DNA sequence: CTAGGGTTAG
């Protein structure tokens, strides 16, 4: 657009409305702050309209929409001696930090609506509940009630949206309930802020109340909700309803329908809707592309992507994310390179959002090098790009890289948001890096993120996984906005630490608090029961889950049940239960659990059956061979054991080398089996020797040569080497004051000898030793382990 | 002379 020609208003001509109108028009036509500066100068020089609040309002709003600095807007406002309500409201709309009561004595409904809207646009994305914004929202809400505007639909919907954005669903609901006659838009605001199932319930209430008519926005929202819970039936109802009231042609409704049908696997229907659209927009394209991708139809997806580009649309990040064939096992790599090429050619890589999407794409393909180079090439990194990279590292198990990148972000003084923090905490949790986790905790306090549910839940998970179950609980107890995920994290924490009874208590408290348990809740509870030996309770919970809550048990639930029964020696019951599981859940996991139980209870016949299934289902996994071979050995069936080992060897299945991490102060130390790399290696080995002597005195029987006679040479050598956890514990004992608890993390499961040895170490040194292995926590105290010797 | 809500993707 060409810059507007500057016409000097002449007082001689028409001092009235015509001139004023042209001045207002010039303001609205200005496309840079510079034009506005000139206009203002002219008006001040001519002395006309300079003090008139109407042009001033237009000017202020235009400055704001051209992103003038807040200080500038405030200055402009202060230049006008007699601001009217419009000018005041305009300032309120542009400056989120202002409070209405500071601004003028009698705010009107516009003031409150503006204050709420500007506040919600100032706090970044949904889920970012920084404490400052939440406090401001509460204060605003109080003022609204005090000023008697709580029943105003405009004000209420602005407030409700603000609360939704801050993920304070309860407060949003309270705002809604204060309005005696909610209109369609207020209903829509409520619906948009709710989760899928909640929104469907609310929609039912809306229709039932029958006081307002749903419109196209309502339907679009409901379709989003139905798609979230994959409820096609609801979708068809809405479709029919839409046709009946002539809303079915609306673009957003059609897109919602497409996406719903696509999500439920009906691509024919989705495509049909798309083809009937007169002029599908980018969102419609994206929805259909995502549908093809989710259904594994990579070719149709890329074809449509090409068509989209050909029709002149600029693909946006959603497009790129949508086109990723997550569910197809082939062609990911190639497609990624093509997309990358396309993006570079179309010069889309200058766009931070698109680069971020590509970074995410590479992360999804586990190609972290390409992801990182994409990230490094971005001249200006956005919050999303940092988050994509950090969470990419965390999700791909490159936990050290994730933490290092977060530290780099801190060093550059880039403020993290809740997503950054959650990803980093997840990396700390995987790593078991408690001191790092505590450092992140301090940053959470510094950044005022302590009211954010996601952040605090991630913190609970981190403390639990890093061994501080008590700290996890105290954070849990202090949260007043817990959601299901928070409860699940706490329950699973107890399970991890073998505290089955605590887990069950919490599960009951959760039901008493009327929180609807999810499939993950039940998994956590079953896991806790299995690791706490609570057989009857576990059986009951499984029954309640399937019969009362109608949740189909998944692979993990079933594995837990087999583990639970197997631990108690109820092998037959476990075997029979497997036939009652849904077919989709019976795989390597379930049979592996049964094999493990057979191993403990020395049932070689059932073990053979289970392992046959396993070799068929999961031939690449060395673990089963080891288990079966060990079982045969313990039954002194050496030839059979040898056959199994030979089989594993011929398939070149290699075991992951074990390593153990211990933190002394803030410094991590990593040990491998038998390694002498550590600077204090000599001291560690000689201490270990003295310690072993004391342990033997106390009754410890180390694995001796005699016990190894059936083991092949290579493996024997491996077993004779001192395992990494013993080295780490010895080092820990050497480096800390008597009485300090020792905390170590191992990448594999603890072996029988080390487990036994650790019990004795805890006894002779009178130390609490906490070991996190690949599957759970062991708390060794005075010769006893919390796992009850079953792991 | 000023307001409030929506569809895809993560």
Image: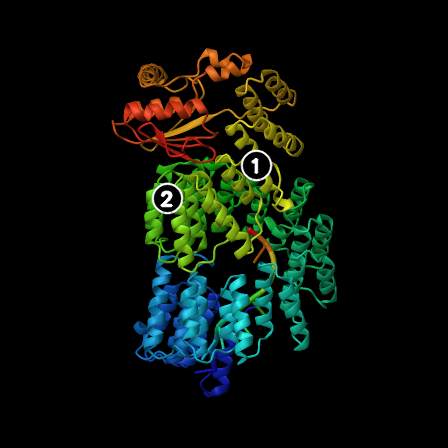
According to the picture, the residue beneath numbered tag 2 turns out to be: A440
The residue drawn where x is 71% and y is 67% is: A277
Task: Report which quarter residue A723 is drawn in.
Answer: top left
Name the residue at 53% across, 67% down.
A201
Name which residue lies at 63% across and 54% down: A319
Residue A100 position by quadrant? bottom left
Which residue does the image show at 63% across and 19% down from the upper left?
Answer: A643
Residue A418 in view (yes/no): no
Q: Distance between the residues labelled 2 and 1?
A: 48 Å
In depth, the one of A709 and A168 nearer the eye is: A709
Front residue of this view, candidates A664 and A740: A740
Whether residue A654 is visible, yes or no, is yes
The quadrant the N terminus of chain A occupies is bottom right
**In this image, A333 relative to A387: left or right?**
right
Horizontal and vertical percent position of residue A695:
33, 18
Q: Which of marks 2 and 1 is in front?
A: 1
Q: Closer to the N terminus: mark 2 or mark 1? A: 2
Residue A558, percent from left and from top:
56, 43
Q: Name the residue under label 1.
A: A572
Give me the chain letter of mark 2. Answer: A
């Amino acid at each position: 657009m060409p810059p507007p020609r500057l016409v000097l208003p002449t007082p001689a001509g028409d001092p009235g409305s015509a001139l004023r109108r042209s001045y207002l028009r010039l303001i609205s036509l200005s496309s840079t702050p510079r034009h506005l500066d000139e206009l203002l100068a002219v008006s001040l020089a001519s002395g006309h309209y300079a003090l008139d609040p109407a042009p001033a309002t237009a000017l202020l709003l235009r400055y704001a929409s051209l992103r003038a600095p807040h200080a500038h807007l405030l200055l402009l406002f202060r230049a006008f001696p007699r601001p009217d309500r419009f000018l005041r409201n305009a300032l309120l709309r542009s400056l989120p930090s202002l409070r209405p009561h500071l601004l003028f004595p009698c705010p009107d409904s516009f003031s409150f609506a503006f204050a709420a809207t500007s506040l919600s646009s100032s706090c970044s994305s949904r889920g970012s509940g920084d404490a400052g914004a939440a406090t401001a929202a509460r204060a605003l809400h109080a003022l609204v009630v005090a000023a008697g505007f709580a029943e105003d639909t405009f004000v209420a919907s602005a407030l409700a949206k603000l609360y939704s954005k801050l993920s304070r669903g309860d407060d949003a609901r309270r705002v809604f309930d204060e309005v005696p006659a909610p209109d369609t838009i207020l209903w829509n605001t409520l619906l948009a802020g709710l989760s899928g199932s909640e929104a469907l319930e609310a929609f039912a209430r809306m229709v039932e109340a029958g006081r307002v008519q749903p419109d196209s926005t309502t339907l679009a929202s409901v379709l989003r909700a139905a798609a979230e819970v994959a409820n096609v039936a609801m979708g068809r109802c809405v479709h029919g309803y839409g046709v009946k009231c002539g809303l079915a042609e609306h673009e957003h409704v059609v897109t919602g329908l497409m996406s719903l049908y696509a999500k439920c696997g009906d691509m024919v229907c989705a495509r049909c809707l798309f083809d009937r659209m007169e002029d599908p927009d980018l969102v419609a394209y994206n929805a259909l592309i995502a549908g093809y991708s989710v259904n594994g139809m990579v070719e149709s997806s890329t074809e449509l992507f090409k068509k989209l580009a050909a029709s002149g649309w600029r693909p946006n990040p959603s497009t790129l994310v949508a086109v990723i064939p997550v569910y197809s096992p082939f062609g990911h790599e190639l497609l990624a390179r093509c997309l990358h090429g396309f993006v570079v050619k179309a010069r889309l890589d200058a766009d931070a959002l698109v680069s971020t999407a590509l970074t995410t794409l590479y992360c999804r393909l586990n190609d972290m090098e390409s992801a990182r180079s994409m990230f490094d090439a971005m001249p200006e990194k956005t919050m999303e790009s940092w988050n994509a990279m950090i969470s990419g590292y965390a999700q791909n198990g490159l936990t050290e890289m994730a933490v290092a990148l977060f530290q780099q972000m801190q060093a550059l003084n880039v403020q993290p948001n809740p997503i950054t923090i959650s990803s980093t905490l997840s990396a700390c949790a995987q790593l078991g890096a408690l001191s790092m986790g505590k450092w992140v905790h301090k940053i959470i306090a510094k950044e005022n993120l302590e009211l954010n549910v996601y952040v605090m839940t991630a913190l609970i998970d981190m403390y639990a996984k890093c061994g501080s179950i008590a700290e996890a609980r105290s954070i849990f107890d202090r949260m007043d906005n817990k959601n299901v995920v928070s409860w699940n994290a706490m329950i699973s924490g107890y399970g991890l630490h073998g505290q089955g009874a605590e887990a069950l208590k919490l599960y009951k408290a959760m039901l008493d608090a009327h929180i609807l348990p999810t499939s993950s809740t039940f998994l956590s509870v079953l896991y806790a029961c299995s690791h706490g030996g609570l057989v009857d309770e576990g059986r009951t919970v499984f029954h309640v889950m399937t019969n009362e809550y109608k949740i189909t048990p998944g692979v993990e639930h079933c594995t837990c049940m087999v583990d639970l029964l197997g631990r108690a020696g109820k092998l037959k019951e476990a075997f029979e239960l497997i036939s009652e599981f849904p077919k989709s859940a019976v795989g390597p996991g379930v049979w592996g659990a049964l094999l493990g139980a057979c191993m403990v209870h020395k049932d070689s016949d059932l073990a053979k059956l289970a392992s046959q299934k396993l070799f068929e289902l999961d031939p690449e996994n060395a673990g089963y061979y080891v288990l079966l071979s060990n079982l045969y050995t313990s039954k002194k069936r050496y030839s059979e054991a040898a056959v199994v080992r030979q089989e594993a060897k011929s398939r070149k299945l290699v075991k992951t080398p074990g390593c153990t991490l211990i933190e002394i102060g803030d410094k991590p130390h990593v040990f491998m089996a038998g390694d002498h790399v550590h600077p204090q290696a000599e001291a560690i080995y000689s201490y270990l020797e003295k310690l072993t002597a004391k342990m033997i005195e106390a009754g410890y029987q180390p694995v001796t040569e005699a016990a190894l006679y059936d083991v092949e040479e290579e493996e024997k050598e491996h077993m004779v080497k001192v395992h990494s956890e013993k080295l780490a514990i010895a080092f820990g004992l050497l480096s800390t004051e008597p009485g300090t608890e020792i905390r170590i993390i191992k990448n594999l499961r603890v072996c029988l000898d080390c487990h036994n040895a650790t019990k004795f170490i805890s006894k002779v040194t009178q130390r609490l030793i906490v070991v996190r292995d690949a599957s759970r926590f062991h708390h060794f105290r005075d010769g006893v382990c919390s796992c009850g010797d079953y792991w």
